[in-house]
Image (spheres, coloured by chain):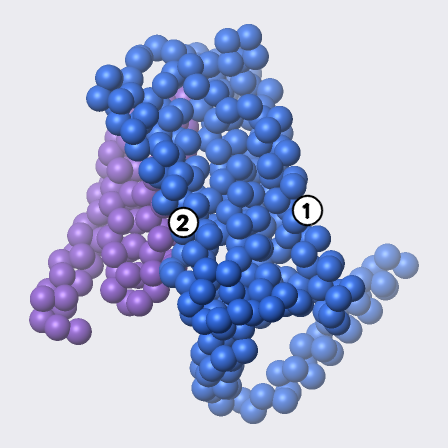
Amino acid sequence: MKKLISIVFLLYVAYQLFVVFYAVPFGTDEVRSKVGRFYLEHSPKDLHVANTVTSIVVNFRGFDTLGEVTVLFLASTALGSILFRRREVHTRLSHLRTSVEASSIVRVAGRILFPLIVLLGAYVFIHGHLTPGGGFQGGVIIATGFLFLLLAYRQFTVEHRTIMWIESLAGITFAGIGLVGIFVGKTFLENFLGVGRLNDLISGGIIPLIYIAVGFKVAAELTGILDTILSISITVDETENQTEKNG
Amino acid sequence: MSTIITILVVIGALVLVAAAVFAVHKRDLVVATVATSVISLVLSLFYFLLQAPDVALTEAAIGVALTTIIFIVTIKNTKRFED
């Protein structure tokens, strides 16, 4: 019965794909000439968004971005569930982070550069609809700032409860904005806010809101991954013993 | 593209291939990891020249910083030299 259902389902998917691709004559260039031009024309005209990449990622293909964010969330959860047990609970610091103190140059530079890196990351994701970059890039830049602090200060740890809250709230915000689109307009992730003027900071409707949420989410996830990875302790002896046991 | 940029692209491509071969053949894994981060750096420059600044930002931040650090921490926790 299960097999039958899956075969019917696959046949249905194949039929739908066939219908879509049958409409496109073989060998014609529909994507570059029509789809690309549609995005390039409608992004500044209808959405008033200067960065076409952002308008595709967040508005035209917003649902795919939600899936992408989910993939990142699942990856970080899986990594955490594997590595979290290996963290040293009492000291919460592995030999990697306690053995050698970072030099004073690194420590002072970390103290000066950390706010600037976070500011750059926030700028990148807040201005995602105006300049290159967006939530993912800004989030990763913020995570590198935290990485600098984690490397410079051996005692610095990240509060995982806070990270969890930031991550959850950002994810809920993304999905919530999408759901409001259903109630206010017609479709999930519909751009229901006014689009404003081209090149204004507050423009593009829901695009900046979603990218700010994505920025917070990515930054929190990657910071959590880095803190977990830097806090685990596996000595060489232990791994060798394990391979001996397994082999 | 102007001549200077073409020369830069050719040099970058050569560095790319050299770093890739170096990363495969080097027994010291830390050196190999640094070679892969060099690949990411040159690649992000290429993305920028090919008018994809969004991808260039991602490649620079993830490829150069995060992946390298994750690899180096993993190497520190396991073994530094390849058998």
Question: In this orientation, which residue lies closer to the viewer: B24 or A101?
Answer: A101
Considering only vertical position in the picture, is B67 above or below B40? above
Q: Which residue is painted at 41% across and 21% down in the image?
A: B77
Look at the image and give the colour of chain B: purple
Query: What whole-number distance in Å separates the C-alpha atoms at marks 1 and 2?
Result: 22 Å
Please tell me the numbered disc located at residue A51: none
Q: Residues within 10 Å of mark 1 (few under 14, many from 20)?
A: few
Q: What type is the residue that disc 1 sits on? A: Ile
Q: What type is the residue that disc 2 sits on? A: Tyr
Question: In this orientation, which residue lies closer to the viewer: B1 or A26?
Answer: B1
Look at the image and give the colour of chain A: blue
- Closest to the camera, between mark 1 and mark 2, is 2
Please tell me the numbered disc located at residue A123: 2
Residue A169 seen in this snapshot: yes
Q: Secondary structure at mark 1?
A: helix
Parent chain of label 2: A
